[in-house]
Image (tube, rainbow, N blue to C red):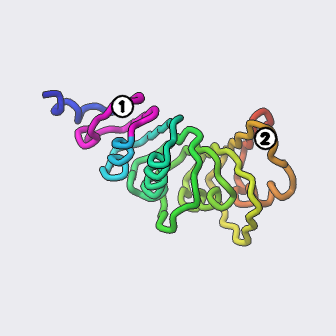
Amino acid sequence: NYEEYFIYIQTLIIDRGINFDLKYFKKLRRLMLRNPKEKIFEQLNHYSLPHIEHLSIAHKFLTSTIQSLIIDLYPRIFSNYFPNLKSCNLFEMKVEMPIQNWQQSLSLYILKVGQIDIFVYRTILLACPNLYFFQLKIFQGDQLLSNTELHSNLKQLVIKDDNQSFPWNDRFINDYLICVPKLEKLKNSSKEFL
């Protein structure tokens, strides 16, 4: 019976097609999932992982069920369900309209996501006041926001624009940069502004 040894595992990397039960990994600090099955997402949305510090999820085969389970995971990431979560990499996953019950994730310092719009961008900044590094893909929308909450800890912002199609103009500066006054490094695919 190997289950008694699972509590000593601190790093777990799971590739496609492997099922496991998270309840046995009580001291897990780093979890990397590559194309996890639905059952794994269901467990992430159910079990508490009080020691998890680094969470990385890559998924290339997004069915509607998987997308729904990912959306259910966002409130856990952007609230305090993972109280020690320092970094989260959601590999190109689109973050949809935030759920109103997002609270704050005070321990999250590094975040990498897929496409987001300006509303989700600002909501993430509010939910993660200690965020230091943020990587995202711009989703162009015509949303106008009037309230600006300042985020004083973000130092590095990476915006992936694979097609180099995002208009780097005054509107971008206003919408995306006005709320990060202490930003030290802004990088766009091949463009870098210091």
Circle 2 crowding by C-alpha within 10 Å: few under 14, some 14–19, many from 20:
few
Res 61 seen here:
yes
Q: Please state the extent of the stretch shown in magenta in the rendering.
A: 15-37
Farthest right residue? Answer: 169
x, y percentage for residue 72? 44, 55
| 20 drawn magenta | yes
Q: Depth check: 38 or 140 in front?
A: 38
3D distance between C-alphas at marks 1 and 2: 35 Å
Where's the N terminus, which quadrant?
top left
Farthest left residue? Answer: 1
In the picture shown, does residue 138 fall above or below 97?
above
Which residue in the structure is indicated by mark 1? Answer: 11
Which residue in the structure is indicated by mark 2? Answer: 194
Q: Depth check: 29 or 145 in front?
A: 145
Q: Where, by quadrant of the figure, is residue 184 drawn?
A: top right
Badge 2 amino acid: Leu
Kindly state the secondary structure of the residue where label 2 is placed. loop
Q: Nearer the viewer, mark 1 or mark 2?
A: 1
x, y percentage for residue 116? 64, 52
Res 106 seen here:
no
Magenta span: predominant SS is loop
Kindly state the secondary structure of the residue where label 1 is placed. strand
What residue appears at the point 35 percent right and 48 percent down from the top-left corner?
42
x, y percentage for residue 143? 73, 64
Whether residue 165 sits left or right of residue 134 in the image: it is: right
Farthest bottom residue? Answer: 146
Farthest front residue? Answer: 64
Badge 1 amino acid: Thr
x, y percentage for residue 35? 45, 34
